Amino acid sequence: MFEKIQGHQTITSHLEKEIRFNEVSHAYLFSGIDGLGKMKTAREFAKALLCQDQIDKGCGHCSVCIQIDHENYPDVRIVAPKAGETSIKISQVREMISQLSVKPYSGNWRINIIDGAERMTPEAQNSLLKSLEEPLSYNIFILITSHYQAILPTIRSRCQSYHFQPLRILDIEKIILKETEFEQGLVSEAVMAAGGSPGMALYLLSNSEIQKERTAYLRELYGLLKGNEIKVFTLAELLAKDKVTSQENLEFFIHWFYELNLLLEGHPLADHGEPNPAHRAYLQLLTNQKNQAIIKTLFEMMATIQYNVNLRLQWEKCFIKIMKIQKG
């Protein structure tokens, strides 16, 4: 059970005990940066609950486990933003809710996974709330999020929360070198930029241009923080391609300023790596108070772009506000 999950033994041990002692909760919140294995853990949890093998739960070989891996088992439902969309709409949540009263197809549980729960619109989150407050005995909800604070407090309070910590650099390197054929030098470079996320490291390795782009974005943003007003417009133009790209870049910026927040408060980076030259340059410009205000601004931007807005204009407004924060 959970043998495929690496680096989160404390969480998987707790989940395994809940299954063994029949203490499974009706709702879970898996939080942590993207690429840590939250979705993989949710899938393995579902397999452990529904597996046909009574001894080796979550065997990975029975028909149920295979169907769950291929995302076509009827008692495991995954809700996520539709292709080309940045948010989970209320219609998607209502469709899921409409099926909750139907008893499971074959097992004792129906697993409802919401991947990217922070992307639910406020209306969608409120629609989900009643189902969490009055759950039917056979329904389990697993909300997966990279932004814990974007989930309504009323939803968070009704879930059992597990926070997935970034992995150590050496552990990520071992995972990637074992599972891929990338060269050691390329792996080390990607891992250093991945913020403790194996998934992000693999993404950067497979999309080397993305890593170069993000380095360029940080350079432009640094110029903006130093008072170069032209950067507001040049950077906004670069980032305002479409909603999905804007969402991804916002997540990158939020993670970047969270790392700076750790360093400003005297903590080590979450992946136990050393600050790189970009970290050190930014730290010379920012105070903890200003950094936290910037994070708040980026979250506000995240909420705004879920709607039909002029992306370039919203990026410009966001950067102008960041400049005002920096100027004090």
Image: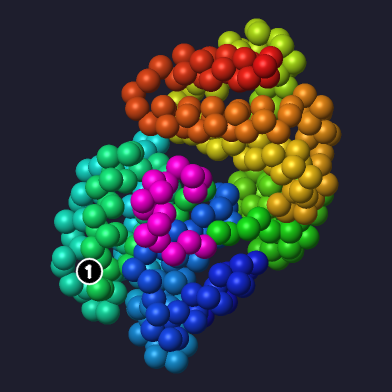
Residue identifier under label 1: 136
What is the x, y in percent for residue 247? 49, 34
Farthest-out residue, top: 230
Residue at 29% x, 74% y is 109
Residue under the image location 77 percent in, 54 percent down: 272
Q: Position of residue 120 (x, y in %)?
A: 35, 43
Residue span colored magenta: 147-162
Residue 184, compared with residue 205, is above or below; it is below
Q: Residue furthest bottom?
A: 55
Residue 129 visible? The answer is: yes
| Residue type of the residue flagged with mark 1 | Leu
Depth check: 289 or 296 in front? 289
Which of the 4 image quadrants contains residue 326?
top right
Residue density around tag 1, few if under 14, some if 14–19, many if 20 or more, within 10 Å: few
Res 188 seen here: no
* Image quadrant containing the C terminus: top right
Is residue 320 found left or right of 68 in the rendered image? right
Is 232 situated above or below 48?
A: above
Is residue 236 rendered magenta in the image? Answer: no
Question: Which element is circle 1 on?
Answer: loop
Horizontally, residue 11 falls left or right of residue 83, namely: right
Question: What residue appears at the point 27 percent right and 40 percent down from the top-left corner?
Answer: 123
> Which quadrant of the figure has residue 76?
bottom left
